[in-house]
């Protein structure tokens, strides 16, 4: 009877351990943390895109400003040349060049104004991205804290169960323990059943009268003729 009790207790411990491990694997915080990290990667990618847009925009601004400086210098040189020339044709040609520079500077000013507006939009987007990342980091930190707290309880439970298991496994002989573990591995962790009237408590199949008789008159620890689990044939309190 002691072996039968030990088998049932071992199975209870193993099933409790399985449930605790499953609960640990399925902690909602784990799923939420993974979802947040995926979202954070997406937002980070947008941040990189925004940074690239800003870099390109700043490069265009720099190029146009440099060109505007060049046009301003050329206009000053043209103005000096016009003032120092008495040749009508030369003055006319230089004046056309001066007007061309002025028009180009107007266009540059228009383009710079557009780039400034674009820069503002990029800045607003970068702020939104930074705020989103900050929120995601706060959420992840909170979920991680909750996960660690709940996971710690489950891990402690698993460790306690493992300690209890180690203590009672020594009560079984090697062959019986090997039989238990082999059946457990192939039967979803349920290797031991109890005989209830005319059926196994696990597979629930009603057994023929002859098999019932054999189980009732046989050893306390036997085998279910149908599911082939270890079956306890007599009440443990008898």
Image (tube, rainbow, N blue to C red):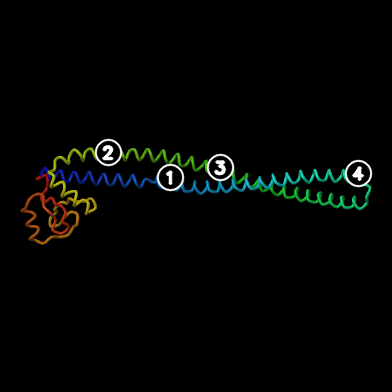
> In the picture provided, is 147 more to the left or to the right than 94?
left
First-in-chain label (3 vs 2): 3
Q: Residue 33 carries which label?
A: 1
* 157 or 43, nearer to the observer: 43
First-in-chain label (1 vs 2): 1
First-in-chain label (2 vs 4): 4
First-in-chain label (1 vs 3): 1
As measured in the structure, the alpha-carbon distance from the residue carrying label 4 to the one carrying label 1 is 76 Å
Quarter of the image where one finds residue 164? top left
First-in-chain label (4 vs 1): 1
| Mark 3 lies on residue | 130
| Mark 2 lies on residue | 159
Q: Do the residues bearing badges 4 and 1 touch, measured as CB atoms within 8 Å? A: no
> In the picture provided, is 230 more to the left or to the right than 17?
left
At which x and y percent is residue 34?
Answer: 43, 47
Quarter of the image where one finds residue 154? top left
Q: Residue furthest bottom?
A: 208
Please name the residue shown 31% across and 47% down the image. Answer: 22
| Mark 4 lies on residue | 84
As measured in the structure, the alpha-carbon distance from the residue carrying label 2 to the one carrying label 4 is 97 Å
Which-is-in-front pick, marks 2 and 4? Answer: 4
Q: Quadrant of the N terminus?
A: top left
As measured in the structure, the alpha-carbon distance from the residue carrying label 1 to the one carrying label 2 is 25 Å
Mark 1, other Cα within 10 Å: few <14 / some 14–19 / many ≥20: some
Which-is-in-front pick, marks 4 and 3? Answer: 4
Q: Is mark 1 on a helix, strand or loop?
A: helix
């Amino acid at each position: 009877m002691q072996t039968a009790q030990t088998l049932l207790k071992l199975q209870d411990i193993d099933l409790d351990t399985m449930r605790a491990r499953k609960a640990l694997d399925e902690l909602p915080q784990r799923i939420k943390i993974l979802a947040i990290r995926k979202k954070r990667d997406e937002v980070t990618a947008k941040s990189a895109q925004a940074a690239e847009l800003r870099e390109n925009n700043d490069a265009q601004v720099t190029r146009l400003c440099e060109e505007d400086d060049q046009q301003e210098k050329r206009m000053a040189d043209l103005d000096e040349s016009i003032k120092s020339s008495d040749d009508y044709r030369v003055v006319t040609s230089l004046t056309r060049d001066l007007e061309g520079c002025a028009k180009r500077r107007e266009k540059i000013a228009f383009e710079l104004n557009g780039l400034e507006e674009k820069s503002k939009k990029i800045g607003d987007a970068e702020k939104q991205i930074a705020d989103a990342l900050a929120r995601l980091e706060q959420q992840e930190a909170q979920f991680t804290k909750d996960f660690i707290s709940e996971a710690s309880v489950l891990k402690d439970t698993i460790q306690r169960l493992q300690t209890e298991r180690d203590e009672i496994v020594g009560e079984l002989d090697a062959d019986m323990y090997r039989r238990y573990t082999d059946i457990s591995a192939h039967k979803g962790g349920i290797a031991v059943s109890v005989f209830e009237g005319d059926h196994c408590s696990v597979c629930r199949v009603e057994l023929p009268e002859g098999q019932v008789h054999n189980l009732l008159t046989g050893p306390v620890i036997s085998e279910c003729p149908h599911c082939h689990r270890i079956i306890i044939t007599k009440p443990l309190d008898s």
